[in-house]
Amino acid sequence: MSNRLTDYIEKISVLYPLHFGFRTGHSMDMALINMHELITEAIDGNRYSIGIFLDLAKAFDTVDHYPH
């Protein structure tokens, strides 16, 4: 079922093309390469480039998964 759903989502292009998480062929390496290319193009074009990076690795540690 998972494969069928994934195939369908890919077929009808529901996801944003630059969504890299949990997709085949869209690894974190690809996200970093894409970011590098965007920054390089901005610098080469004498444009500004700004990045906001959030580390959400521990974000869900604050959620109470076991209500009292």
Image (cartoon, rainbow, N blue to C red):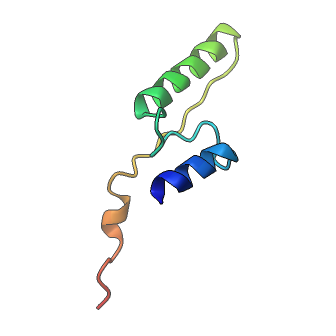
* Residue 64 occupies quadrant: bottom left
Nearest the eye: 48 or 30? 30
| 27, above or below 64, in the image | above
| Residue found at x 59% / y 30% | 50
Nearest the eye: 3 or 37? 3
Circle count = 0
The percent coordinates of residue 51 (x first, y second) are 55, 33
The percent coordinates of residue 31 (x first, y second) are 49, 31
User: Quick one: quadrant of the C terminus?
Assistant: bottom left
The percent coordinates of residue 61 (x first, y second) are 30, 65
Nearest the eye: 67 or 48? 67
| 48, above or below 59, in the image | above
* Residue 41 occupies quadrant: top right
| Residue found at x 70% / y 47% | 12
Q: Is residue 12 left or right of residue 32?
A: right
| 3, above or below 18, in the image | below
Q: Is residue 6 left or right of residue 28?
A: right
